Amino acid sequence: MNNSDSNGFDMIPYEEFEALLALIADIEDLMDLRAAKEEDANQPSVPLAEVKRMLGLSREFDKPS
């Protein structure tokens, strides 16, 4: 980043800027996930098999082919 203009600001390529934005979005998503997990830490969990039963899904997908 040696492309300083007269104001002393550095410039980065647009692709690098987009990559930084994507990284920021990923970090924000991770922070949101961690906050949600913390919020639900004391909530009871439901096994996947029970969820499938509640949704009326077939156990056919669980069988190896």
Image (spheres, grey):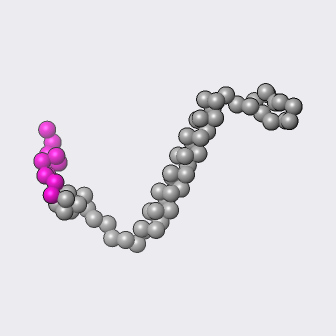
Left or right, 65 with respect to 9, comes to left
Q: Report whether residue 49 is seen.
A: no
Q: Which of 16 and 43 is in front in this view?
A: 16
User: Residue 18 colored magenta?
Assistant: no
Q: Which residue is drawn at 53% across and 46% down?
A: 26
Give the image quarter of residue 20. top right
Please state, as top left, top right, bottom left or bottom right, where the N terminus lies in the image.
top right
Q: Which residue lies furthest to the front in this view?
A: 6
Q: How far from the left and from the top, in percent, is residue 36?
A: 46, 62
Please state, as top left, top right, bottom left or bottom right, where the C terminus lies in the image.
top left
Q: How far from the left and from the top, in percent, is residue 5?
A: 83, 30
Q: Which residue is drawn at 23% across and 60% down?
A: 51
Q: Residue at x 15, y 58 (%)?
A: 56
Q: Which residue is drawn at 40% across and 72% down?
A: 42
Give the number of marks.
Answer: 0
Q: Which of 55 and 42 is in front in this view?
A: 55
Q: Nearer the viewer, residue 7 or 23?
A: 7
In the displayed structure, 41 sits above or below 57; it is below
Q: How far from the left and from the top, in percent, is residue 16?
A: 63, 32
Give the image quarter of residue 2. top right
Q: Report whether residue 61 is seen.
A: yes
Left or right, 6 with respect to 18, comes to right
Give the image quarter of residue 10. top right
Q: How far from the left and from the top, in percent, is residue 9?
A: 80, 36
Q: From the image, give the main secondary structure of the stretch colored magenta.
A: loop
Q: Nearer the viewer, residue 62 or 27?
A: 27
Q: Which residue lies furthest to the right in this view?
A: 6
User: Residue 58 colored magenta?
Assistant: yes
Left or right, 26 with respect to 1, comes to left
User: Which region is colored magenta?
Assistant: 56-65
